[in-house]
């Protein structure tokens, strides 16, 4: 597989929020050429613990002027805004572009499921199962839709130029944190 | 002068706003290592056509964890949020770091002054004069405080790796536009 270094990719992360106060959370997407530089930023809002992350992310990607050139979408975790769980296979179908979830630490799926169970969010448990188990790729764990794990791992490696996670996700995280706290801290 | 390529710099831009509706405008700052990659984002709000841009930018820089390592602050124009004119010499004194204003096109100072005159904002006309005339540096125009024009021009050249303006300013512009419109368009 011959992958150009300047392929266009999108990285998505949500911003921090106050679960006792906020109903909506801003989600930031950053377009990158490979792992090299940002050439666009998009944003949307999703409901805290809601069900609309998949459709909101699809809208955000589909209305973007870069959509036709996108090779993949990286997302920092399967949940946005608390437990607004993303259906990555449906997202892949809605946007027609491979979706790769990237996390630094292996998520404790059993624990998340037991919390969702207590909250009566059984539908979301099925979305977790549907996403498939997180697979180790380099120093991170990934889940993907619309692309093989091998190709997804290559794209992570190609774009993770300044940390273990793809640059657009790292920068989306910096932006999300700064919007809420006035300054970004820590890692995606 | 031996300038390391990975020096830490900050680029600042304001976001678009609706002058009939908005009282405050979000201002975004992006920390970069040279013209290479972002390693932090900060934000603040300034009043539309207000007088507080200098103090708000100083606070934003001074509370940042990267402040002690900053080599310069690039700003996209002398005005934030309409006519909230920055006093770049006072800003330089408040933060102890050189300030470089970078614009693509030579501003029509006489026109800006006549608008300020009509609005009764004579204090701001003095700030424009105090900033000194914009000087051509490569493809852009700069004004600076706390640094010679020659050194400032070198820093612009070093950090303008993907356009004619420093990377942190270009990315701050993308972020500001996306926050307001959902997507960034055009250039800083």
Image (cartoon, coloured by chain):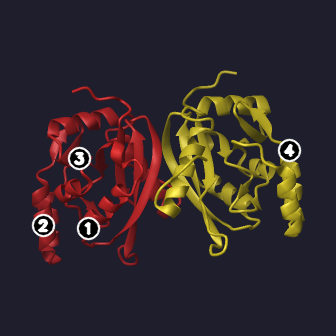
Chain colours: A yellow, B red
Q: Chain of mark 2?
A: B
Task: Tell me the CA gap for discs 4 and 1.
Answer: 52 Å
| Residue at the image position 32 percent from the left and 65 percent from the top | B56
* Numbered disc in front, either 1 or 3: 3
- Badge 2 is on which residue? B125
- Badge 1 is on which residue? B84
Q: Residues within 10 Å of mark 4 (few under 14, many from 20)?
A: few
Residues at marks 1 and 2 touching, judged by CB atoms closer than 8 Å: no
Q: Do the residues at pointers 1 and 3 share their chain?
A: yes
- Badge 3 is on which residue? B98
Q: Chain of mark 3?
A: B
Q: Is B80 placed left or right of B132 in the picture?
A: right
- Badge 4 is on which residue? A132
Q: Residues within 10 Å of mark 1 (few under 14, many from 20)?
A: some
| Residue at the image position 71 percent from the left and 49 percent from the top | A77
Q: Position of residue B23 (x, y in %)?
A: 37, 76
Helix, strand or loop status at disc 4: loop
Q: Residues within 10 Å of mark 2 (few under 14, many from 20)?
A: some
* Numbered disc in front, either 3 or 2: 3
Q: Position of residue A30 (x, y in %)?
A: 55, 47
Q: Quadrant of residue A8?
A: top right
Q: Earlier in the sequence, mark 1 or mark 3?
A: 1
Q: Earlier in the sequence, mark 3 or mark 2?
A: 3
In this orientation, which residue lies closer to the viewer: B149 or B16?
A: B149
């Amino acid at each position: 597989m011959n992958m150009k270094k300047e392929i266009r990719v999108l990285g998505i992360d949500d911003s921090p929020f106050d679960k006792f106060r906020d109903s909506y959370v801003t989600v930031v997407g950053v377009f990158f050429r490979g792992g090299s530089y940002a050439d666009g930023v998009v944003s949307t809002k999703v409901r805290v613990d809601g069900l609309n992350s998949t459709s909101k992310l699809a809208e955000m990607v589909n209305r973007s002027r870069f959509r036709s050139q996108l090779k993949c979408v990286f997302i920092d975790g399967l949940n946005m805004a608390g437990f607004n769980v993303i259906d990555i296979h449906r997202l892949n179908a809605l946007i027609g572009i491979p979706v790769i979830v990237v996390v630094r630490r292996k998520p404790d799926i059993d624990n998340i499921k037991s919390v969702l169970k207590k909250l009566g969010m059984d539908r979301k448990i099925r979305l977790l199962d549907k996403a498939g188990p997180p697979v180790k790729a380099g120093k991170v764990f990934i889940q993907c839709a619309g692309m093989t794990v091998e190709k997804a791992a290559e794209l992570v490696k190609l774009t993770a130029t300044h940390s273990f996670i793809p640059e657009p996700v790292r920068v989306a995280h910096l932006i999300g944190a700064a919007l809420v706290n006035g300054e970004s801290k820590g890692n995606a």
